[in-house]
Amino acid sequence: MNRTRPMLPYMVWMTIFIVVPLFLIVYYAFTSTEFNGVALTLDNFRRVFQPVYMKVLWRSVKLAVVSTAVCLFVGYPAALIMAGNAFSRKNTVIMLFVIPMWMNFLLRTYAWLTLLERSGFVNQFLARIGLPSLNILYTDSAVVLGMVYNFLPFMILPIYSVLSKIDRGVLEAAADLGANKVVTFLRVILPLSLPGVISGITMVFMPALTTFVISRLLGGGQYTLIGNLIEQQFLVVGDWGFGSAISMVMIILILISMAVMSFFEDGEEGRALW
Amino acid sequence: MVRFLQRTYVYLIFAFLYAPIAVLISLSFNAARSRGSWGGFTLQWYVELFQDRVIMNSLYTTLFIGITSALVATIIGTAAAIGIHNSRGWQKKLVMNLTYIPVLNPEIVTGISLMILFVFAKLQFGYLTLLLAHITFNIPYVILSVLPKLRQLDKNLYEAALDLGAEPWYAFLKVILPEIMPGVITGLLLAFTLSIDDFVVSFFTTGSGVATLSITVYSMARRGINPKLNALSTIMFVAVLLLLIIVNVRQAQDEKKARRQNDKENTLSLVGRASAADIDPEWMQQQ
């Protein structure tokens, strides 16, 4: 009996529902049906490079980069603290970071809608302590806030898991050799934690770049982000060719960022792209 | 002092993460319709929630799709995991890469690519397309839950069963399946959770009149904030929390029994969805 046979149904399933659909995207991106029949074309990609759409693309990349940076600068210290000895029940603390992540992300985003309203909780709180009200709902700031809120745990957890594995002996050795805390951090801890930082960045940047829900609920306008543009092309405009072309550009952006990431990572532990 | 500051920093992050959830939950018991004032405790919104046709229908759809897709994905996925476990070399690499496509692909791409396929195949958008889509993104997670259990399995057990005269199928049912059962159940629960949690893929693959809870939340949220949604959010939060606790208690029990794995794997198994994107390279190296 061929012992690999049980995976046959799976192979067939994945070919039909994963591989074929991806080829369909490529097919639609490179063809047009405007004339009688189907013609190969680059028009869809040319359209992506029109200023209007480049603006959307640039904005998506910008917001994703800003959100990733905020997550990194807020999350790294948190991971460092958790890996240290500030908390005695570490597993509980980690659990507390995981739980909100498992709440439906629509509901979490929706919760911010309630908080950020003109007469919402945030503004009531600000008024009570005598600060001017904050009207960031339906702006880019609200979108960044929504992204940070949704993706922060994705940054903290991988960094924490790498930090918590660092051998204490290495830190003691650094101290014995005369390094102060700052030097130890810069020359020992930071380089050793780089793999965690890299997977954290990947895990935040990718969903931030591709989301269309956060921007739709918290942001203003219809064409906020690349994800919204794709959604519109498929569900409203019905221009699959253009939608597919943008999707391909988005995938290429992700592949490039993953390649850049793996370039920064140590060769020894490097994560091959595939 | 340093310790105090450190703790405060982490507590502030927790406040940021939990404040919106706490506000939603407390508002679901607020009698006043406006969010500005507290009108006293009420269960009114919960009562109205269960009388709301649209919401109840989407609840049934969510459960139906969740249970069915998790069951089908578990069957296909467990079989696939056994096949992958037995395969070697390029064959194994190919299948594992195939498994990681839906895990690493942005959800929106999975969604639109399936939508194109279903239109191409002239399928009627509705329960069937939704189900096919959910099974598709669930199978890889089942495989990733079952494979570690297969690696812990003693190869000789199956051989021994065959030597003692068991048919391969009988040996599988009586020897292998009981051993990998914890992984299978974890995969089933994970698949169910992912299915009820999904929005993006469902959004692109559902038809008119068929909505999951996530889709209903999305369309209602865009029309304005509704107290019934707060009640619904609270129920869903508690439900997912319970499921998560069950899954994690199971995993903790398994891990006690099994050899101690390293910290990273433990943490990442908690993260579930996040883990799959991250364990990829290391997992491949171990093979």
Image: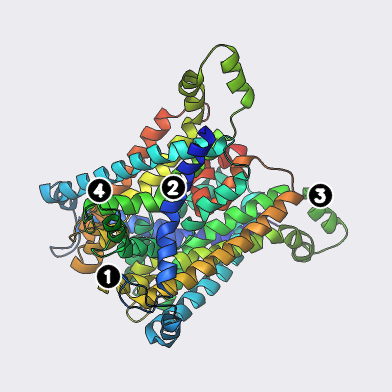
Q: Is residue A273 visible?
A: no
Q: Which residue is mark 4?
A: A60
Tell me which amino acid carries mark 2: Leu
Circles 2, 1 touching at the beta carbon (< 8 Å): no
C-alpha gap between disc 3 and disc 1: 58 Å
- For the residues beneath circles 4 and 2, the answer to whether they share a chain is no
Q: Nearer the viewer, mark 2 or mark 3?
A: 2
Task: Say which quarter of the image contains residue B75.
Answer: bottom right
10 Å crowding of disc 4: few (<14), some (14-19), many (20+)? many
Looking at the rendered structure, the secondary structure element under dot 3 is helix
Q: Which residue is mark 1?
A: B222
Q: Residue B175: x percent and y percent?
A: 79, 60
Tell me which amino acid carries mark 3: Asn
Q: Nearer the viewer, residue A112 or B182?
A: A112
Tell me which amino acid carries mark 1: Arg
Point out the tag, 2 or 3, that comes first from the N-terminus. 2
The residue at 12%/48% (across/down) is A50
B248 left or right of B48?
Answer: right
Tell me which amino acid carries mark 4: Ser
- For the residues beneath circles 3 and 1, the answer to whether they share a chain is yes
